[in-house]
Image: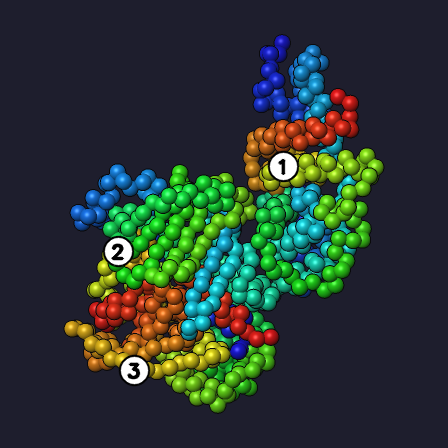
Amino acid sequence: MKLDPDRELVEACQATTPTGLEGAFRRLYDQYKDRVYNVCYRITGNATDALDASQETFGIMFRKISEFRFESKFSSWVYRIGVNASIDHKRRSASRWLPSLELHGDESRGSARAELRDERTEAPLSAATRHELEAEVQAAISRLSPKLRAIVVLRYVENLSYEEISEALQISLGTVKSRLSRAHEALDRELTPVLDRHYLR
Amino acid sequence: MSKERHFDCESVRFALIQRADGPHDDAALDAHVVGCAVCRRELARAELRAKLVRSLPRAQAPTALDGIVVAALQAGARQARAARAVEDLPTLAAPEELARRIPGLVAPAVLDRLVGEDLADPSMTFARRYAGRLQRLRAPTELEGRLRRNARRTSPLLGAGILGAAGVLLVAAVLLFTYVGREDTTTGSSGPELVIERVESIRDLDPAAGLLLSGLTGGFVDAQRLAQEDS
Amino acid sequence: MIRAQRIGGLVAAFGLGFLAACGGGDASSSAGAPSTSELGLLIARSPAVPEFVSAMVDAPERVAHGGVRRVEYHLAVAGVPASLVYDERVTADGQGRYAIEPVAVASPAMNVPQRELFEELQRARQGFFFKYRDLRVRGLDLFLQNYLVQVLASAPVIAGVECVEIQITPRNGPARSYQLAIEARSGLVLRSIERDGGGTTIASTTYLEFTREPVLAGVEFHVERFPGTPLATAALSAGAAPAAPSVLPVGYREVSSEVVQLAGTTYIRRVYGDGLENVFFLERVAATLPTSQVTVAVPKLTVRMSELGPFRIAEVVRGGGSFFLVGKISETDVLEILRSAL
């Protein structure tokens, strides 16, 4: 059986209870934070929701890490949590009344290193074609149903293998294939006008 | 030679998608694609779609996420403590063990006193120590009297150890004692004579009844009780 | 007030185990025997009974579904109106597994620790919610015997789903009514509104989002932590003579009788149902039994009576044990039941 590259780090985390972001937890977090954020961003479609979903993903990950038994790859497990958190977040956002956390120093949210645009807050610009295309592709992805969105993001943004996707989404390989086919179909519909604009047929 | 695989067939479509994803060991498909304009076009489109999504810039987690995750860990730790307290309690034998499991939650000495049916400290001091957060009680002397009375009433519970303490605690936790004793009597044709005592505040109920009621009302009783905690 | 979180934590385990045990009871079928009353048979066989009414029976267990629903309770506490409004996510796999997860609380306002504790309590109660709080029809014959069903002309769309709507009124007991919006094909209730005799809304549950294809991956389905033992097979300590009501409110039948053990305390929990609602009779068995016969005739017993909305709550302490009765029944019924049991 292939050795899980995260095994040592995960076992180190399982040996202690987290009191803060330090030690093995800090290292694990650093390893996964971009991956998690990336998935959450591409599935939720905007930076604010991505932040919330990422926070929830890590919260669940750290809370449940002691129960992880390496029956699947650790990364698949993390991706699963991230996908679910992102999808759930979109469903919840309409009915959210209370913040889930009292944050210290909220002002840095959405700023700093992220080069990504928050679709909702940024004013439309006559940006470079590349940025415009990126936004349109993201918009197309956002219009997919949650299941199809998840598979597109995992396959083409995170480059997971079909087996890893199967593990992460807890679906059979056959379902991975059929869903990917449907995702392509749906993307085809969504992207055709985009392609028409940017590429010659 | 390969059978004529129609474009509409699911397997061909997916085979093309796989082909678009990267090198794929399907010589038959490749041979077909060379000769079939429809499949060639579909393959090109699939490749383009994949390329478009792949070319999305990789997001970097903003520094803000660090602080948020730290807060989540702390909140999670709090929640985990609450959850553990909730799960483990029935199996804990002794109040001291409880105090060990949930540091800061209870003062074992106070708990021992309760279990021993000794409400020697029914005043604000007791309430403050137990709660850990200072709250204004309305009528301390009245409270003292009622605590004594209610402790006697709930004494059958105390044999159950921690549950007894919880029962007394629940009673002691009531902020608004609107316990009114009005006496009615009613007798039926058979069975014991029943004397009705009206209880105005549902929080004066026995924990078993109160929690059953909470279950039936979707947590209404607990929500009201929790929300009325003054800051 | 003493910090509720700490108190709640202590009381919760007791109550949660208790409630969780209630959730584990066998309530999937109501009084086993089919109705023998002519009226019941007539109603059940009448072609006028729509198919979806039959489909309602145990639909939440049989049909996979999921979504987010808004739950509201509006009840007067000591004369003062109060509300509970919150959202919860439901997932059911159609094979009897389910999860009800609190999402957000709108009212009353709570700070973070309060809300966290509340959510933990709700999570531990989900078994009870699924079995007894959520409106369900159990036993078509029994239900139709006790309730009048009228199909309404409205065809509301709830969470994007077209529904039929019915009004249910009890034939017996205190006046109240239920308005249910049902997805006809599955029999799932997408919206339920309970009103008191005066027409004021007491409680409602409405799906905000709904699907017949819920995401099951990653869902933590409810696991019964404190299963009860059927009373008939349980071995009670010698000398214990469980009290059993011999008088029930009109239309109610025994659903289950179980023994539950919680931290060394024994409870006997009896559930009675009328096809829609349930009445609970609880006995907390005395911790120490006297060596002589327990049932010494007691001339006078005090019944502590309380009300919350449509619910009547009664407590009696006798000997070393306590008895509780909770249900949507009249005070007279409460007293009759207690008298027949004690």
Quadrant (top left/top right/bottom left/bottom right) for the N terminus of chain B: top right
Which residue is labeled 2 in the image? C171
Task: Write down the residue under mark 1.
Answer: A144
Question: Looking at the image, can residue A36 be seen?
Answer: no
Residue drawn at point x = 65 percent, y = 29 percent: A189
A60 relative position to C193: left or right: right
> Is the residue B142 above or below the residue B100 in the image?
below
- In the rendered image, residues at marks 2 and 1 fall on the same chain: no
Q: Is residue C115 left or right of residue A75?
A: left
Residue sitting nearer the eye, A75 or A46? A46
Residue flagged by tag 3: what amino acid is it?
A: Glu
**Disc 2 vs disc 1: Cβ atoms closer than 8 Å?**
no
Q: Position of residue C34 (x, y in %)?
A: 22, 47
As rendered, which of C303 and B86 lies closer to the eye?
C303
Q: Is residue C12 above or below residue B149?
A: above
C8 or A190: which is nearer to us? Answer: A190
SS under mark 3: strand
